[in-house]
Amino acid sequence: HINAFRFFGGVPKNIVYDNLKSVVLSRLGNDIHYNPSMLDFAAYYGFKLKVCNPRAPHEKGKVERIIAYITNNFMQKEEYHDFKHIRSEALLWLKNTACKRKHSTTGKVPIEEFEKKEKAFLLKLPQKAYDYAAPKVIHPQKDGLFRFDANRYSVPEDFIHQPLTLKAYQDVLKIYCKDQLICEHPRCYDKYQIIKGITSPVFISLHIYLLFPQYLLSIK
């Protein structure tokens, strides 16, 4: 969602979903129990949630046919090294191919129609993107590592055996002690890797500030 909003330069006023669990937790006819996280996300960006009726494929339009187009066009192009490479190539493909082709049904160029007829109706983007990472408590082991997915990541040695908070984003993992960012890692999608973290500059400055008086005392 967030990447799509950035790509289009705004937020649609209404978004229609199928009854996937990330949107609908349960449903009995028109009595819909929405996922609270999705409601919070929609409220942050200001759009209204709408869901299709069960067993009503005509309400989805032709959205599912785009999967075949992507598979037979973009995914046939070349080999991709990792998710970051896929995303960068996909953005180029969207701008230079998918958005500029003549649509087989309408006979019009999608990006031209969007710019002329739809973009002006989008809601403005908020200054900051929604923080979608759910906090998770972690407990680093005596070797200074904690496990996430199928990999292990490091924390600064001062925080071994302390409960810390992990926030996992698409490309990065951030580790906090209370509200203080202490280190971060590029997120690894391989398995059984050990990744050494990049210590937060704020934490380094704080660490130096706390140790400096001890250093002065030691040289007297």
Image (cartoon, helix red, strand yellow):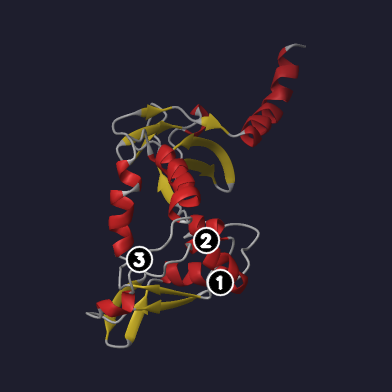
| Residue that extends furthest to the right in the rendered view of this protein | 220
Distance from the alpha carbon under mark 3 to that under mark 2: 29 Å
User: Residue 22 — which label?
Assistant: 3
Disc 2 on helix, strand or loop?
helix
Q: Along the line of sight, which residue is nearer the eye, 214 or 141?
A: 141
Residue 16 x %, y %: 40, 74
What distance separates the C-alpha of mark 1 from that of mark 2? 10 Å
Considering the numbered disc 1 on the image, is that residue within a helix, a strand or a loop? helix
- Above or below residue 179? Residue 121 is below
Residue at 54% x, 56% y is 7
* Residue 15 visible in image: yes
Label 1 – label 3 distance at C-alpha: 27 Å
Q: Nearer the viewer, residue 91 or 100?
A: 100
Tell me if 166 is positioned left or right of 202 in this view: left
* Sequence-wise first label, 1 or 3: 3
Please tell me whether mark 3 sits on a helix, a strand or a loop. Answer: loop
Q: Position of residue 137 (x, y in %)?
A: 42, 48
Q: For the point 35% across and 79% down, which residue is it?
A: 33
Q: Of the residues under marks 3 and 2, which one precedes in the sequence?
A: 3
* Residue 111 - label: 2
Q: Is residue 29 left or right of residue 84?
A: left
The picture places residue 91, in percent across and down from the top left corner, at 48, 47
Q: What is the quadrant of residue 210 in the picture?
A: top right
Q: Quadrant of the C terminus?
A: top right
The residue positioned 29% from the left and 82% from the top of the image is: 53
Amino acid type, label 1? Glu
Disc 3 or disc 2, which is closer to the eye?
Answer: 2
* Discs 1/2, front: 2
* Residue on which the image places disc 1: 118
